[in-house]
Image (tube, rainbow, N blue to C red):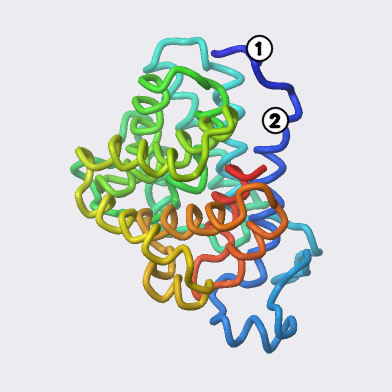
Amino acid sequence: ITQMSNRSRAHYEGAMLGLAIGDALGFPAEFLSIQEIRSRYGPKGITDLQPSAGHPAGTYTDDTQMTLALARAIIARGNASEGEFLDEVAREFVAWSQSPDNDRAPGMTCMAACRALAADPSWRAPGRNDSKGCGTAMRSAPIGLAWHGDEATIIRLAAKTSELTHGHPCATAGSLATALLTSWALDGIKPRAMFDRLMSVTTPISGEFAAKLRQVPDVLDDEPESAYAVLGEAWVAEEAIACALYAFWRTPTDYRQTVITAANMDGDADSVACIAGAISG
């Protein structure tokens, strides 16, 4: 695993805290329309941590829980063989799925895949499901941190861990997108260069994913409500990455505004704020 030689510990902590805080900010807004968010939290929408679904303010969701499961697997087995590492990831995902703390609207695809992994640890999604949900994109930031500077390994392992639960190429592209964007953020890569690099990497994987990503520069000057009407509600991987990149690109040096922009949307607000928070943090 790459050592933190050219970036301080604070950059790594920033990415992990950034995604968890973004996730927690978006948790109360998930499943609400932007009109409902404004009605409940004021004309500016949700701008601070709020309680949700019986949980206190600052509670993160399955997005961060799965991210932490992946991070634990990296710490435990990141220098092991690829097969041993993926087995550890599968074990961590299954343990998460069976935890009593898993009570925050986890994705159906992730839960179904974890049940299959519990029955057969060698189970893999390709050929078994065709889901392109954003459950892979929301959790893959630790791969970009752990193997920072080694893009070939980031791409390979982000794809492999994605395939534990999701079989669609868009989900694969979404997983490596979050990992790469987080890694590039450590190097201070500008948003436009991030976009260009990501287009180059993801186009061969999924033309559908690349087509959605291509819409981001076109809406940068639009207000979030209008932009998200184009980019989508982020339940699927390509929309989640497009929305998160839009939020970050608008305010690349302002974490707070980035996650607020991400959380105030129709749809999967916590996942978009989680992904944007990892990059910005």
N-terminal of the pair, mark 1 or mark 2, is 1
Residue denoted by label 2: 11
Asked which quadrant contains residue 51, the reply is bottom right
Q: Tell me: residue 281, above or below residue 48.
A: above
User: Quadrant location of the C terminus?
Assistant: top right
- Given residues 119 and 16, the one toward you in this image is 16
- Given residues 251 and 18, the one toward you in this image is 251
Asked which quadrant contains residue 142, the reply is top right
Instruction: Rate crowding at label 1 as few (under 14), some (14 to 19) or many (20 or more) other CA atoms within 10 Å.
Output: few
Residue 5, numbered circle: 1
Name the residue: 64% across, 81% down: 37
Where is residue 136 drawn, in percent x and y?
43, 45
Residue 122, numbered circle: none
Instruction: Rate crowding at label 2 as few (under 14), some (14 to 19) or many (20 or more) other CA atoms within 10 Å.
Output: some
- Given residues 44 and 169, the one toward you in this image is 44
User: Quadrant location of the N terminus?
Assistant: top right
As shown in the figure, which amino acid type bears the numbered disc 1?
Ser
As shown in the figure, which amino acid type bears the numbered disc 2?
His
Name the residue: 51% across, 10% down: 79
Where is residue 230 drawn, in percent x and y?
37, 72
Where is residue 156 drawn, in percent x and y?
34, 25
Where is residue 252 drawn, in percent x and y?
61, 49
For the residues labelled 1 and 2, the Cα–Cα distance comes to 11 Å
Q: Say what secondary structure mark 1 lies in.
A: loop
Name the residue: 23% across, 52% down: 130
